Image (cartoon, coloured by chain):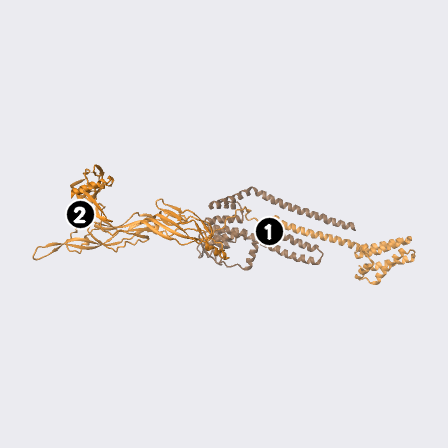
Amino acid sequence: MRTFTGIFLLLYSCFLSAQDVQFTASASPNILRIGEQFNLTYTSDQELGEINVPEIRDFDILGGPSQGHSQSVYAENGKLTTTSTWQYTYFFRAVKEGKFTIPPATAKIKNKTFHSNAVTVEVIKGKDPAASQNQNIPSQGTSKEADNLRDEDLFVSLLLDRKEVFIGEQIMATIKIYTRVNLFGIDQSFKGPDFIGFFTEPVDVPPLRNLQREAVNGDIYGTGVIRKVVIIPQKTGELTIQPFELDVTLRREVRRKIADSFFDDFTIPEVQEIPVTLKSKAVKISVKPLPPNAPPSFKGAVGDFRLSSTINKSNTATNEPLTLKITLSGKGNLKLISDIEVKVPYDMEKYDPVINTHLDNPLSGSKTFEYLIVPRIAGNYTLPPAEFSYFNPESRQYKTLKTQTYQIDVVKGQGDTLMAVIPGIAKEDVKMLNQDIRFIKTKTFHLRRIDTFIMQSPIYAMLYVVALIIFILILWIRNRLKLQKADIAGLRLRKADKYARKRLKKSAGLMKQGNDAAFYEELLGAIWGYLGDKLGIPVAQLSKEFAKSTLHERGVNEELTDQLFSVTDACEMARYAKGTGDLVMDELYLEALDAISRLQQKLK
Amino acid sequence: MQALLRNAKLIGIRHLRLYLSLITIIAFAWQLSGTARAAGSEGLKVIPDSLVSEGNEHYLNREYDLAVKYYTRVIEMGYESAELYYNLGNAFYKLENLSNAILNYEKALLLKPGDEDIRQNLLLANARIIDKIDNIPDFFISRWANSVMDLFSPDQWAYLALILFVLTLALFLAYALVNHDGIRRMVFITGVLVGVLTGLSMLAMKGRTKRLLQSESAIIMVTSVNAKSSPDEQSTNIFVLHEGTKVVLVDSVLNWKEIRIGDGNKGWVPDEVLGEI
């Protein structure tokens, strides 16, 4: 049988390349107390020809190598697979404290040398397990079992990967149980503490089956992770996670004394299950606020992210939707990021995004936002970049990511023509996008002296005075001119009588001289001149009828005017028919003199 | 006689000539003084204008604090204009300094009451302040009077009053000189009307000037202030006012001012919390 396998292997290994040979070393357990034993095992899938184990002085060798060989054959998809394992095991005992590395061993397989991996073994001083065991042996009864359990034998603690964080930063919280005693069971309904002030996201952990050996506080404990939660602080300051309680069951062997009257007292071993409630310690976390200079697109994301985007098409027709997919990936509070704001041109309609979250591990992953965008009006549009800001706790800085811009060409779709036919529908009010103050006035404007007004200047008041003076002056001049005019008329009026008499006297002289023609002329002149002066009418414009009517108006009776005009008529007549005689002339002279005197009295 | 008449006319013409020359001399003097004033301020005027444009440039570059600095320099030099106050108000608005923004908008509005941009920005700034006070509407006559007064600047009113005054005199002169009865009556009525208008525009000029020279209202410049029942720190608090609220100044005692708010309530506040418009 053995030779057969040997031949088989020989044949088999011919097809096997050297790289495929597995040669590993492992130590079990690799954490131990002084005085405890451990196995150093070299494992290979080939039969090892010659094995060279390095010299190990840090441990006492107890035995070995003991060889083992196992073979398993299993069928998979109708194919038989054979796996063989050769093991070489050495037994050691730890004698001194420290962390020791066992260098790689070498093995020769078909004239080729292979190296195994190095193995690290940690040896701690440890407390004598016997000592604690002794204490656990109860002296009397069973009721005080739990009291004998010391805190360091069994405890539960909440571990955080960091204790100083920024608000919104993720913390991995792990609840771990540590035991040095025989743990039998853990309360399955345990939900963990209330993380007040935190957003929590539980992480799936496999149910606890085997405890891991771990050196804690200079002793070896069996440890196990009960729960894992990602917690994100939602407020700043010193946050405390309150202690929580965990119910566990211990299994312990006790010896009960049986008192018997016939026999000696003897003890029988008995396994007891003891319920124990463990209480954790409060944990404090200091949460720092974010720096104040947050960019406008910052919505509370903390971590380290990358942003990418794709669009399914850049040419479309009206009412034919586009899909814009934005992917945010990285480490951080992805679950808390609800939205990446996408701005679309106003002639496009945007629907609420379809959001998918995919976590690679509890602390990182990616989130996709799929926006459906429907263009309503044909044209060339630019989709502005979507902005996403986050705070990076490592660099303590805000960072802003932008997606790329997309040019979208929208042509008129078929459905659109119908709409365009109906008048009025295509018309829209101008949409007010935002409110802001109006821009400054940049045209050059007139700067004036503060609080100086034309009204206050003396020149302004003077202008009023000047205008008034001009007004008064013009009135004054006008009055003077009127006065002067009136003066001339008055002079004539006053002097009319005197003037007439003067002319009459002259005519009398002419009569004496016998100058008939001159006499008549002078007499007429005296009468007409008098009338002209008295009535204020130029002599040239004076007619007999006009004079008569004017005189009548001014209250001169008919008899007098008749007398006056009979003289003038006679004079006219005499002028052209000469030789009427001195008597007539004398009479006419007296008549004229009398008429003028009487007129003078009437027209005063 | 004829000679006498001609003589009289000659006197009139000679006088007219004298008046004409007098008018030209006055006009010339006016102009001369005007150019003299312009020349006197020429040396200084170059600087404020360039300061304004520099301020505008900073505003464009979003350096609002620098813009404020430049505009304020111009005002400190003794110049003002509605546009300058408006720009300064805008810069303050951008700096989120609402009380100063409102104060400067109000100052701008006082100089140019009809400007739509100033009104719009003041409205926006006022929408952002804390206090919302329901204004008692003015009596409609005073509202009309104010809106008529706001049609022109004080200087414009001054010119208008002068022109109307001269027109009134001219009309009365025409009344005195024209012989025709119908025309005389018409000229007289128009003269009286224009005379009344002259008086009104003088009143408007006085009113506007007074409003510009004496501050009638003020803006609260501090985040919040208690209005007291009397000018005394120990007296009762009547109401609280916040930054940017406009109040009417009623009285003043030492360094306290009595103010009236839009709903008619009165109270006393210290001088330093107010920015007078």
Foreground disc of the pair 2, 1: 2
Above/below status of A302 relative to A568: above
Write down the colour of chain B: brown
Horizontal and vertical percent for residue A106? 21, 38
- The chain under label 1 reads B
Q: Say which residue appears at 84% left-offset and 63% top-offset.
A: A559
**Three-letter code for the amino acid on which mark 1 is drawn:** Ala
- The chain under label 2 reads A
Crowding at dot 2, Cα within 10 Å, few <14 / some 14-19 / many 20+, comes out as few
Which residue is disc 1 drawn over? B158
Horizontal side of B224 relative to A147 (left or right) equals: right
Crowding at dot 1, Cα within 10 Å, few <14 / some 14-19 / many 20+, comes out as many
**Three-letter code for the amino acid on which mark 2 is drawn:** Pro
Horizontal side of A40 relative to B57 (left or right) equals: left
Horizontal and vertical percent for residue A260? 9, 57
Do discs 2 and 1 belong to a common subunit?
no
Looking at the picture, tell me which residue is in the foreground, A208 or B113: A208
Which residue is disc 2 drawn over? A129
Secondary structure beneath label 1: helix
Horizontal side of A158 relative to A505 (left or right) equals: left
Q: Which chain is orange?
A: A
